[in-house]
Amino acid sequence: MFNSKIKETVMNKFINIAVVATLCLASCQDSLDKVPLDKVDLNNYFTSATDMELYSNGWYIDILERKPYDNQDDYRVNRNLSELLKCGTARSTPQSGGGWNWEPLRDINTLLEIAPRNCKDKEALTFYTALARYFRAHFYFEKVKRFGDVPWIDRPLGSSDPALMNPRDSREFIMTKMIEDIDYAIENLSSDGGPYKVTKAAALALKSNFCLFEGTYRKYHNINLEGHNWDYYLEESIDASEKLMSGSYGNYKLYSTKSPDKDYRDLFASIDAKKDEVILAVKYNISPNIGHNVNAWSLSSNSSGPQFTRKFVCTYLMKDGSRFTDQPGWQTMGFVDECKNRDPRMAQTMRTPGYMRIDGNVVLATDLGVSFTGYQPIKYVTQSAIGDYVCDQGSRAVNDMPVYRYAECLLNYAEAKAELGKLTQADLDKSINLIRKRAGMPDMTIGNTPDPYLINEETGYFNSETAGNQQGDVLEIRRERCIEMAMENRRYFDLVRWRSGLSWSQNLYGIYIPGPCNLDVTGDGKPNYVFYAKGTVKPSLENGMVAYEIGKDILLSEGTKGYIDMHGSQVQGIFNESRDYLFPIPLDDLQLNHNLVQNPGWTDIDR
């Protein structure tokens, strides 16, 4: 695991606490019998701010760390599709694991229970209680997204504690507790310390996110529970976003050097997080050697093969704000032509004609050996080296990874307003249009008609009509969100909360190939690839050209021509609307706790 040296320091000091067994249901009954609590003098722990700081440092990795390659979705896939994308019979109830892991919660609750008894420093106690409650809210957000109802546990449990057999609490109860935790965190955390420490602003960002998720999830899934309605959560999301936008919790703004052709790229390739915009980030360093492998993942043919889909690329607007899918001949447009005059963020997210590395002076073609759709990601890709330090080898990229950005809070604000039917032009001007200005794009105006591409059954959203009287504006905000937040691990659960499972069953096409041809992807007029008919003689190659035999080396949607369709050879199932929005509880955990009830449609156990 990355940041292993930090975690080792923490765990050596608190090993007898931090490796205590999982909450109760972590599919590892043996671990419940291995905790030497009788050998730990808990009175020696949590007596000072230093103790609590060391103990909580590991949470930044264990709970927050997410990387661009953690999840696939309909817009960003790997060479081999994940089980989630294959849907249908490809998904099954796991015996164990599956995200039903409660160890971090045990660690959080341990501090919350013991520190008040041991720490005499009231200021430090209040701060680290707030920090722990922030992480508990974050932990439960991840659980609710995956499983819906889950048990609420607010104290560390021993192996014989009857609470180990608790049933699942309702999502309304869980959300109420999460709001209590996050409001305490907002009140008692520091305004200073970002972007590598949790602050008031980070707590507001988390609240903005989980309240938007809950409000839209309940709206689109038609969930009505005793307590609060879906609109309450959207109002709470708006309130959290507005507080961030007010400047009272930190003077955040969008990072910009007034260079729309590189600012978006540099925001993610920066070695140090851009503090203007990044509210919270995971820190990486050359020394000690704590890195990640986003460069190698994006560039190497030995990686999992990251790539964007044509469905995603077609959502980018033209530079003048018009729709690409309104352009004549867009369906069969070649790669060089479809990349012309597009939203500048497109060329800062994927390789387009003329692409060069940040520290390079050579134009690089999109590499079909890495990304066979032809749409190769470059977001997060840094310079190849920093002095003598090579960033492209293994886990040696050291650019910081944002957890929350100010731009996301602006997107949350606009979406919640539109979902409530309250969006105004003034709202757009202080949210979406700030993001568009940074990108060099025209303003969005209120009152959009729904884009046929975004409501089409082959390319758009299921249940988009539920958006209400501002459906067209909601769809445009979704477009903006998906472009601005590409590869930031939001898309999968956005589709979940919008009840758009149909999107996972849509085609995962690549660039259009008109048939046997020479293909230029750099825009210099010189071919980079040769596609030749199956059964014919492979043509002679020169100047670094690569040949692909149609129907063998490359698969096209219409056989001898069409969109690259390499994923079509994989089993892509049909999303199960009555089952697949929630994850299954593992069978081992159902066996351990018979009070748990499996999510609908998933394999249960004999009771």
Image (cartoon, rainbow, N blue to C red):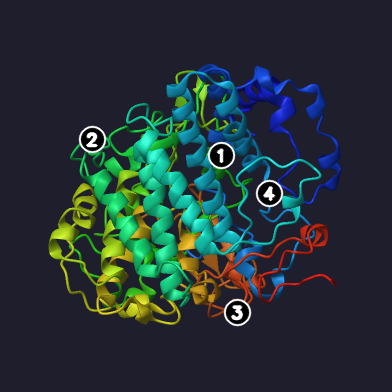
The mark that comes first in sequence, 1 or 2, is 2
Q: Amino acid at mark 3?
A: Ser
Decide which of tag 3 and tag 2 comes sooner along the chain: 2
- Spot occupied by residue 155 in the image (x, y as percentages of width and height): 63, 42
Question: Hey, what amino acid is under mark 2?
Answer: Asn
Label 1 vs label 2, nearer the camera: 2
Q: Which residue is mark 4?
A: 101
Secondary structure of the residue carrying tag 1 is: helix
Q: At which x and y percent is residue 597?
A: 71, 68
For marks 3 and 2, give the CA distance. Answer: 44 Å
Marks 3,4: beta carbons within 8 A: no
The disc at residue 251 is 2
Locate the N terminus by quadrant.
top right
Q: Mark 1 — residue? A: 296
Question: From where the camera sits, is residue 60 visible?
Answer: yes
Q: Nearer the viewer, mark 1 or mark 4?
A: 4
Q: Kindly identify the amino acid type of the residue bearing the numbered disc 1.
A: Ala
The earlier-in-sequence mark between 4 and 2 is: 4
Count of marks overlaid on the render: 4
SS type, badge 3 = loop
Label 4's element?
Answer: loop
Left/right of residue 543 with respect to residue 25 in the rendered view: left
Q: Which one is nearer the viewer's eye here, 530 or 205?
A: 205
